[in-house]
Image (cartoon, rainbow, N blue to C red):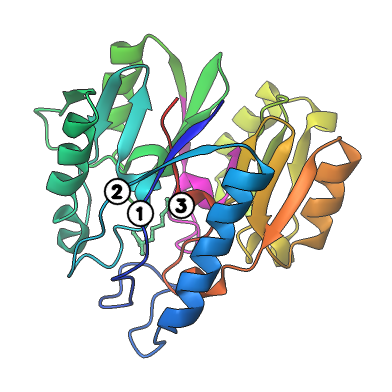
Amino acid sequence: MSRLLVCPPDYFAIEYEINPWMRRANTVDHERATAQWHRLMEVLERDMGIVLERMRPVPGLPDLVFTANAGVVVGRQAVVSRFRYPERQREEAHFEQWFRDAGYEVITFDQEFFFEGAGDLLGFPEYWFGGYRQRSDVRSFSLLSELFGREILPLELVDGRFYHLDTCLCPLSGGELLYYPPAFDSYGQNAIMERVDKDRRLAVPEADALKFACNAVCAGTHVALPGGCPATSQWLQERGYQVHPVPLDEFMKSGGSAKCLTLALD
Ligand code: ARG
């Protein structure tokens, strides 16, 4: 059974601009955002059988909804994020407190390397991928690799629109991978192609990638992904996945979607 950490969008808004999707003038329709978030939770809980842990939203922290950036959880250990932008650094103490209250052994790096949690660290049981340059510092991955005894393949993110790894790469439970090749340099693209067989990876077409098709939540044979990603949905269905499209365009205004709104707890 999967468990995910989520945070209700009570204070979700666009109050600053730290990625190319965010425009303060592009006001969030609060009622719509709330309805979209609740619909996603319903799909995760009811259709996908996921257990949700809800953390308390905090006024003045509009991006706290994106719990993927809280940190990364492995077993009973949680590494708390160090955000690149001061606007989000104010979230760190709240995520850290949640991990402590939930009984995790909290790990913080002494070095001030930026690391934005599961937004930039994703993978398969045997090895992980680490996305760097836009937000996380590549040096954080050697510390994480040593800490957890896992191989981490660093992937440089070269397109500002795909600033977190989870906006352009999604490992699936059956060993398949969704990714958007132009978000990576040729070294990264080759590393992905070497690791994942051709018939098990989908080079997501641009139209779907721009709808954040790669920002999907996979649990068992179920995948929840943003609405409007027909090519990706079809590919997943052909491989036996049950696809649950959820409209999340209010969160796209902040540069986030389904996966960003969750943090895997086991
Ligand atoms: N507005 C947020 C930011 O720019 C969105 C974060 C999305 N999270 C993610 N894991 N991709 O930091």
Label located before the other in sequence (1 or 3): 1
Q: Quadrant of ligand 1?
A: bottom left
What is the quadrant of residue 145 in the picture? Answer: top left
The image shows residue 56 at horizontal and vertical percentages of 25, 54
Asked whether the beta carbons under mark 2 and mark 1 sit within 8 Å of each other, the answer is yes
Q: Secondary structure at mark 3?
A: helix
Residue 7 is tagged as 1
The residue nearer to you, when weighing 212 against 43, is: 43
Q: Residue furthest right?
A: 238
Q: Residue furthest top?
A: 149
Residue 205 is tagged as none
Q: Residue at x 57, y 51 (%)?
A: 215
Query: Is residue 156 covered in magenta?
Result: yes
Name the residue beneath numbered marker 2.
55
User: Alpha carbon of mark 2 to alpha carbon of mark 1: how far?
Assistant: 5 Å
Q: Is residue 225 left or right of residue 202?
A: left
Q: Residue at x 23, y 33 (%)?
A: 99
User: Visible in this render: residue 216?
Assistant: no
Q: Quadrant of the C terminus?
A: top left
Q: Residue at x 65, y 49 (%)?
A: 224
Q: Is mark 3 within 8 Å of ligand 1?
A: yes
Relative to residue 120, is residue 32 depicted above or below? below
The segment highlighted magenta reads 153-170
Relative to residue 37, is residue 215 depicted above or below? above
